[in-house]
């Protein structure tokens, strides 16, 4: 009987020891797991930040490449400003088709086209296409704003106008202004400026 009681006590003590060890191990594992979660959270946060910075750097590099190509196109006089928007002196803006609305320069020839596909125009694409020879072509960079500006005069059978193009300091977005010599009429475009070999604009028929 004594041996039985002794064995029961021994077994109980062993069970308590096992339970205590298990609880201690569980507590340590919980702490370890908690720390691991925190570390994983910090790691994910760092990875997310790194990816964001990587994408930002890639975007800036792309914008710089586009800008450099645009400046080179201005210098070599071979570019097209493909307009997404047209606006007047009062700032009233309409969205336009970039493949049909543009200011193009190739060497000493300039073309300006305004077109709306839903209309019947003189050029076969719903608008007008005018061209002429370029004189007084000048490029200037504003060191304060970073804007590169081009000005020139165009003279042709149906066009006599002063043209100004302002290329923004980042990327290849630009604004253009075409102002007639003998009228208050002014056509303003906003869009991307690309080398002619990258342009997908379509030139309509010039009638004169």
Image (spheres, rainbow, N blue to C red):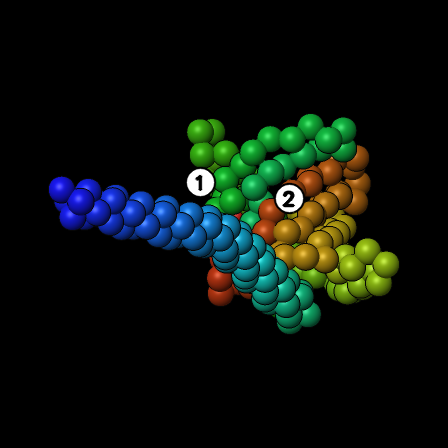
Residue 50 image position (x, y, % from top left)? 54, 59
State which mark lies toward you, 2 or 1: 2
Mark earlier in primary sequence (2, 1): 1
Residue 137 image position (x, y, % from top left)? 75, 64
Question: Dot 1: few (<14), some (14–19), or many (≥20) neighbours within 10 Å?
Answer: some
Q: In which quarter of the image is the N terminus?
A: top left
Instruction: Name the mark on residue 104.
Output: none
Res. 203 visible in picture: no
Give the residue furthest to the front: 2
Residue 77 is left or right of residue 40, and the answer is: right
Q: Residue at x 58, y 45 (%)?
A: 83
* Residue hosting label 2: 190
Q: Residue at x 58, y 58 (%)?
A: 53
Q: Which residue is drawn at 79% across and 35% down?
A: 184
The answer to whether residue 180 is above or below residue 132 is: above
Tag 2 and tag 1, C-beta contact below 8 Å:
no
Residue 203 image position (x, y, % from top left)? 48, 50
Give the residue furthest to the right: 144
Along the line of sight, which residue is nearer the eye, 93 or 181?
A: 93
The answer to whether residue 95 is above or below residue 43 is: above
Q: In which quarter of the image is residue 128?
A: top right
* Residue hosting label 1: 124
Q: Which residue is drawn at 24% across and 49% down?
A: 10
Residue 59 image position (x, y, % from top left)? 56, 58
């Amino acid at each position: 009987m004594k041996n039985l009681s002794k064995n029961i006590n021994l077994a109980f003590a062993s069970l308590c020891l096992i339970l205590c060890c298990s609880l201690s191990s569980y507590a340590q594992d919980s702490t370890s797991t908690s720390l691991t979660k925190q570390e994983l959270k910090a790691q994910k946060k760092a990875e997310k930040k790194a990816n964001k910075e990587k994408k930002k750097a890639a975007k800036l590099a792309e914008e710089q490449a586009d800008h450099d190509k645009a400046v080179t196109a201005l210098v070599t006089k071979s570019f097209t400003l493909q307009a997404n928007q047209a606006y007047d002196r009062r700032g009233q803006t309409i969205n336009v088709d970039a493949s049909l609305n543009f200011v193009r320069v190739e060497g000493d020839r300039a073309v300006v086209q305004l077109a709306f596909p839903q209309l019947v125009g003189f050029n076969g694409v719903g608008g007008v296409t005018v061209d002429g020879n370029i004189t007084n072509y000048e490029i200037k960079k504003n060191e304060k704003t970073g804007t590169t500006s081009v000005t020139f005069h165009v003279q042709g059978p149906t066009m006599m106008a002063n043209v100004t193009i302002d290329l923004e300091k980042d990327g290849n977005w630009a604004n253009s202004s075409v102002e007639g010599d003998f009228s208050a009429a002014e056509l303003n475009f906003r869009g991307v400026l690309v080398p002619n070999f990258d342009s997908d604009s379509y030139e309509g028929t010039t009638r004169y």
